[in-house]
Image (cartoon, rainbow, N blue to C red):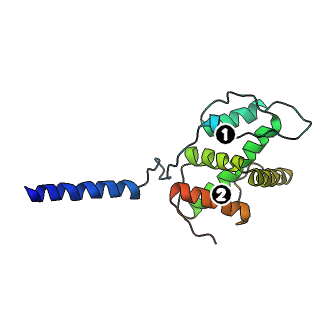
Amino acid sequence: MTYVYIFLGVLAVLFVGAMFVVKPRNEKGGILVKKPLLDELVIPPVDDDDDRAATNPQMESMERTFGAKFRRQISFDQASLILDARQYAIGMLSFFERSGHPIDEATGIPAIIHFIMKDPELRDDISEWGRERFKRGHGKAIPLLKPDQNFHKVYKFISELSGETPKIQ
């Protein structure tokens, strides 16, 4: 009888250990990360004289990204900030995927957007990065990110969130 209890105890330890090692994945093999709530998104005021509301295409794009409708009105420039952060997130997840560590886009992109929007310096840098891409006509292409200071901040965040640490070339 004691052997049965020992056996069951070992099975319980293995099961609990496997819960920490085996990461939940989507149907394509991408690691699922904790998706923050849309209502928690930090949307700072934008110092600009342009007070236009976000366009319908901007709102639809953001709603597809977050899988929820915005319950507050945001400006065109605020929407641009969020969409620049989304493009950067797409570039980061593309890097992880090319490195053999795919992250689920439906959870990873919103998580990275939230992270970028909470850090004023990072947010401003990414906004400038997005404007430059748009001026060059690359606004919609999947970005190849350079491993600069911003890259390392976002890389560290998503690595800690996912438990994945692909090698940076």
Position of residue 103 relative to residue 54, above or below, is: below
> Which x, y percent locates residue 113?
67, 47
Q: Nearer the viewer, residue 49 or 94?
A: 49
| Residue lying farthest to the front in this orientation | 2
Q: Quadrant of residue 15?
A: bottom left
136 lies left or right of 68: right
Please state which amino acid type lies under the numbered disc 2: Val
| Residue lying farthest to the bottom in this orientation | 169
Q: Quadrant of the C terminus?
A: bottom right
Query: Which residue is at 69% across, 33% downward?
Result: 60
Query: Which residue is at 57% across, 44% downward?
Result: 106
Q: Which residue is mark 1?
A: 41
Query: Which residue is at 56% across, 59% downward?
Result: 159
Mark number for residue 154?
2
Q: Quadrant of residue 63?
A: top right
Q: How far is the residue under mark 1 from the one under mark 2?
A: 16 Å
Position of residue 91 relative to residue 169, above or below, is: above
Does dot 2 land on a helix, a strand or a loop?
helix
Q: Quadrant of residue 99?
A: bottom right
How many numbered callouts?
Answer: 2
Does dot 1 land on a helix, a strand or a loop?
loop
Position of residue 164 relative to residue 24, above or below, is: below
Q: Quadrant of the N terminus?
A: bottom left
Q: Residues within 10 Å of mark 2 (few under 14, many from 20)?
A: some
Tag 1 and tag 2, C-beta contact below 8 Å: no
> Which x, y percent locates residue 10?
22, 59
> Which x, y percent locates residue 112?
64, 50
Please state which amino acid type lies under the numbered disc 1: Leu
Q: Earlier along the polypeptide chain: callout 1 or callout 2?
A: 1
